[in-house]
């Protein structure tokens, strides 16, 4: 199946710094990618929809100025957690559908996740 | 997107079939049923999806009732590595349609 890769897999940073997480579709093009966040023992929570060449669409309650999303190409979306604080520590996961796959029937492929720890 | 209801947890003996139910009584005509699983500390893994016909692949079978209000994921011969949280999600198709995760079912395969 198609592959979505995230980098880094894990990162530790100091409070107040910014962290960038990359999400790449390795063997397909994706006009749309999705960013999720998952706290321990909880389900995945959709944060935003990343659209290639345009602004991301954020879910209710997600601060767009804190979680900056850039989708500059059909294979790369980035999530930047700005001025990170300990409460931002979480597992961040991206996903994408194959743009040229059968519309309406394609599965969403997920990255391996990026674990952020803010000290 | 329609909401789904799944049992919180289930046990299954290794080598036996695991049958995971999902209720989606408010599903609309153009919405698909997707199944994903998440093994601890990993990204979700796609298992199978369907619209109204039963589906089978190398991982599992998906049985959708005729009224489409419920479905069952079947792992024919569960192994210890199948221990994971299984999510049943209903969503429209198309590249921009997002998947909203519920709480899922924690399947524990016992030796």
Image (cartoon, coloured by chain):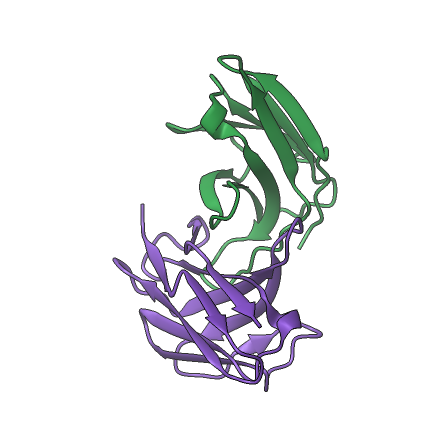
Q: Is residue A32 above or below residue B19?
A: below
Q: Nearer the viewer, residue A6 or A31?
A: A6
Residue B5 appears in the rendering = yes
Counting labels gives 0
- Looking at the image, residue A68 sits to the left or right of residue A70; the answer is right
Q: Residue furthest left?
A: A27
Q: Quadrant of the C terminus of chain A?
A: bottom right
Please report the residue visible at 48 percent of the width from the left and 69 percent of the height from the top.
A12
Please report the residue visible at 59 percent of the width from the left and 87 percent of the height from the top.
A65
Q: Is residue A117 above or below residue B84?
A: below
Chain letter, colour purple: A
Q: Nearer the viewer, residue B49 or A22?
A: A22
- Looking at the image, residue A77 sits to the left or right of residue B23; the answer is left
- Looking at the image, residue B79 sits to the left or right of residue A63; the answer is left
- Give how far across and how far down residue A84 sits, in percent: 57, 79
Q: Quadrant of the N terminus of chain A?
A: top left
- Give how far across and how far down residue B103 sits, in percent: 68, 45
- Give how far across and how far down residue B83 sits, in percent: 53, 30
Report which colour depicts chain B.
green
Please report the residue visible at 62 percent of the width from the left and 27 percent of the height from the top.
B20
Q: Is residue B53 above or below residue A4?
A: above
- Looking at the image, residue B30 sits to the left or right of residue A54; the answer is right
Residue B30 appears in the rendering = no
Q: Quadrant of residue A26?
A: bottom left
Please report the residue visible at 51 percent of the width from the left and 66 percent of the height from the top.
A116
Q: Nearer the viewer, residue B42 or B102?
A: B42
- Give how far across and how far down residue A104 sits, in percent: 46, 53
């Amino acid at each position: 199946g198609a592959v979505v890769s995230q980098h880094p897999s894990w990162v530790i940073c100091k409070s107040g710094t910014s962290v960038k997480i990359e999400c790449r579709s390795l063997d397909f093009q994706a006009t749309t990618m999705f960013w999720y966040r998952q706290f321990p023992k909880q389900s995945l929570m959709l944060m935003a929809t990343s659209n290639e060449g345009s602004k991301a669409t954020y879910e209710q309650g997600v601060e767009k100025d804190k979680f900056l999303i850039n989708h500059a190409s059909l294979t790369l979306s980035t999530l930047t957690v700005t001025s990170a604080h300990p409460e931002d520590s979480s597992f961040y996961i991206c996903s994408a559908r194959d743009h040229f796959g059968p519309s309406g029937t394609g599965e969403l492929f997920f990255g391996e996740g990026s674990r952020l720890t803010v000290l | 997107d329609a909401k789904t209801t799944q049992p919180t947890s289930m046990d299954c003996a290794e080598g036996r079939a695991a049958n995971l139910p999902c209720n989606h009584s408010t599903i609309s005509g153009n919405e698909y049923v997707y199944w994903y699983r998440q093994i601890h500390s990993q990204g979700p893994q796609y298992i199978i999806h369907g619209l109204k016909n039963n589906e089978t692949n190398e991982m599992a079978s998906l049985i959708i009732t005729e009224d489409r209000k419920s479905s069952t994921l079947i792992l024919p011969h569960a192994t210890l590595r199948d221990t994971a949280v299984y999510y049943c999600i209903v969503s429209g198709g198309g590249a921009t349609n997002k998947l909203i995760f519920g709480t899922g079912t924690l399947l524990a395969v016992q030796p």
